[in-house]
Image (cartoon, rainbow, N blue to C red):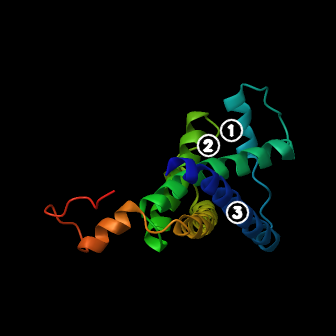
Amino acid sequence: MLSRAVPQGLLAGLVGAAVMTLGEKVEQRCSGRPDSHVPARVLERLAGRPEQPRQQPRALNLGMHYGQGAVVGVLRAVMANAGLRGPVASAMFTVVRLTSDQILENATGVGAPPQTWPRRELAVDVPHKAVYGFVTGAVADALAARHGPGPGQRHAALRPGRHSDVGPPPR
């Protein structure tokens, strides 16, 4: 399952990041909000590179943005292959995407905890990450579905719900 999930997740995460970026660019044109250079700053810190005092190189920004999207997408593909599919799984995954951002940004000192952000910033960031989460989920679900139901789905088919007297399905 994992050998299948890695390439599926990398692809799903890249597609999700691309659609999120497109949405961000549309939003920026409408709102006048400038590009964020947080991804580049996080990558500089993680790589131990000297920080650029002004605008960050676009390549670093895009590398971190798409790289993180691809890598985190692998987790969504693992979810899909295990049988966690659909909108509920994508909502759970959106929280994971937001959390991965915050871990990296806060651990490197580049960002601050979201509860300290102005509400307007949250109102912009959270929907963009939700777009990523749901697009990545749709792609991961479609790719995983080509291999049939996941173990969790096979288990649920025996008797829907969570029951202690229902064992795992046969291999």
Give percent across and percent down for residue 117.
57, 54
Residue 150 placed where, x, y %? Answer: 42, 63
- Graded by Cα atoms within 10 Å as few (under 14), some (14 to 19) or many (20 or more), the crowding at tag 1 reads many
Residue at mark 2 to residue at mark 3: CA–CA distance: 25 Å
Determine the residue positioned at 61% across, 67% down. Answer: 139
Return the disc, 2 or 1, that comes first in the chain's sequence. Answer: 1
The one of 137 and 153 positioned closer to us in this rendering = 153
For marks 3 and 1, the one nearer the N-term is 3
Closer-to-camera residue (2/72): 2
Q: Nearer the viewer, residue 59 or 137?
A: 137
Q: Which residue is mark 3?
A: 15
Q: Left or right: 62 with respect to 80?
A: right
Q: Looking at the picture, does residue 99 appear above or below residue 151?
A: above
Please give left or right for residue 154 compared with residue 14 in the image.
left
Dot 3 amino acid type = Val
Q: Amino acid at mark 2?
A: Gly
Instruction: Write down the residue under mark 1.
Output: 42
Circle 2 is placed at which residue position?
A: 111
Separation of residues labelled 2 and 1 (CA atoms): 9 Å
- The residue at the far left in this view is 165
Q: Considering the image in quadrants, where does the C terminus appear?
A: bottom left
Query: Element at badge 2?
Result: loop
